[in-house]
Image (cartoon, rainbow, N blue to C red):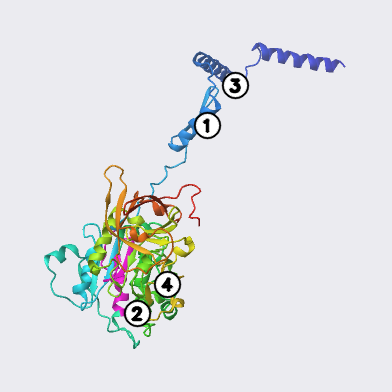
Amino acid sequence: MKSNNQKDSSEKLMWDRSLSGSGSPTRPGSKLMMLLLLLVSATYVVYTLKLISNSRACHVEPFSAVVRRLNDIVNSSQPLIIFQSNRTAVIESHTSPPPPPPEETELRHVVFGIAASARLWKQRKEYIKIWYKPNQMRGYVWLEKPVKKLDEDDEISLPPIKISGDTSKFPYKNKQGHRSAIRISRIVTETLKLGLKDVRWFVMGDDDTVFVAENLIRVLRKYDHNQMYYIGSLSESHLQNIYFSYGMAYGGGGFAVSYPLAVALSKMQDRCIKRYPALYGSDDRMQACMAELGVPLTKELGFHQYDVYGNLFGLLAAHPVAPLVTLHHLDVVEPIFPNMTRVNALKRLQVPATLDSAGLMQQSICYDKRRKWTVSVSWGFAVQIFRGVFSAREIEMPSRTFLNWYRRADYTAYAFNTRPVSRHPCQKPFVFYMTTAGVHPTTNMTVSRYESHRVAQPECRWKMANPGDLRTVIVYKKPDPHLWDRSPRRNCCRVKSKKNNTLEISVAVCKEGEVVEVM
């Protein structure tokens, strides 16, 4: 017990000495620890006093304002700053500004390749002058051999002439065709090799093809030019489509090839052509190569081959609900306006095409309930007035004013529905062709005038108003350049009034609930 008490006394003495700093000297590490504690304490006191002196009253922002401000910050891609009590947190925004929308396709992005013949060049060049705009378009006429030097007017109004490359190395075995089909099929490739800049589309057509260029651009804008596209349409002849292909764009009606597809085609086309010596034309050779590339035809109803004979009136007066892009085989059919040359008739069509290209040839159907008439307006071309009431389903079908390509009056040979020309003396339409068109200076409405086509009409014994008493139809229509930006739908027409020998009609977008309803 004694030894234990002594031991306890000895430990207590050492503890007291260490607390009082007396006794044996302390280790250097203990002094450093004490100094460090004092330094930290002092720093904490100074920092706390500084924060207290700089503190502000807390401002609480409404939640809606916070959300709005955050949206503004995100949209402007600025750093995101969040205030939390007395501390500020900065969160870097990784949102980059959205890329600018791609530039819309314009005429300057298109290059036309026009297949022409030196033998027919003198008369066919007049068709090209109607639609080609040298200051706005790029294109080339491809001939098999040089022609007589153009005069000054032709130099200004026509595309430059190019001579196609030699195709004698390619086999051609079709006994009914001509080997010029090989050189024509290579026009897209040869135009590509000219190395033009800023090209999105190559557009093919014949020298007797007339383009409505503004509508062509409307169609091409629907598609991504960076992808592979082959755009065109079929023949009107069912037999032609069977003999050649329902998956082929007919070259006379025109077709478009996107730039990437033209590049892919150029790398394999010559090899491809050698594999098809028995094919007839240039367009089926193109389609054969497209099949090897795996690119199908994208059909657009506004490209018109017009493999028919006779009068195009039935087709033009009931144009499909699609922008009119091309007219072809103009040397084969009658002039589209009576008592005119083919070229002058097409020049007349350019007047409404300039005023409202989107609405050109678009059909509207309505009724004059008072007189029990059916009215069909093909804007910029013709107006038809029928005695009695016809359903829209009937009137939107083309009447068979034309003959089949194989010169047979066989209505089953068309690739679309048609209706016969009425033989009933009271149901033959009274036709009014457009003569002039302009824009009203106050209302900015287009005002087109249609004059009666005076032909002998059979006697009708129906006790009803006679459309033959009319001499003129006036149609009012507001230009609608965005017609094809909306879903396809015919415009509606409304009979406004009849004054003396003139009938006034308005054409416009259909109102809510408006229906072409049989009375």
Q: Earlier in the sequence, mark 3 or mark 2?
A: 3
Question: Which residue is the site of mark 4?
Answer: 423
User: 449 and 405: which one is in front?
Assistant: 449
**Is residue 467 visible to us here?**
yes
Crowding around mark 1 (Cα neighbors within 10 Å: few <14, some 14 to 19, many 20+) is few
Quarter of the image for residue 320 reads: bottom left
Percent position of residue 372, x then y:
45, 57
Q: CA distance from mark 1 to mark 2?
A: 65 Å
State which mark lies toward you, 4 or 1: 4
Q: Quadrant of the N terminus?
A: top right
Are the residues at dot 1 and dot 3 in contact (C-beta closer than 8 Å)? no
Disc assigned to residue 33: 3
Going by the numbered disc 3, the residue's amino acid type is Met
State which mark lies toward you, 2 or 4: 4
Instruction: Work out whether 110 lies above or below 38.
Output: below
State which mark lies toward you, 1 or 2: 2
Q: CA distance from mark 4 to mark 3?
A: 119 Å
Residue 207 is inside the magenta segment: yes
Instruction: Work out whether 369 lies above or below 423.
Output: above
Disc assigned to residue 67: 1
Q: Earlier in the sequence, mark 2 or mark 4?
A: 2
- Horizontal arrangement in the rendering, residue 295 relative to residue 154 (left or right): right
User: 335 and 28: which one is in front?
Assistant: 335
The span picked out in magenta is: 181-210
Q: Report the residue at 28% width, 61% height from top.
A: 349
Disc assigned to residue 281: 2
Q: CA distance from mark 2 to mark 4?
A: 39 Å
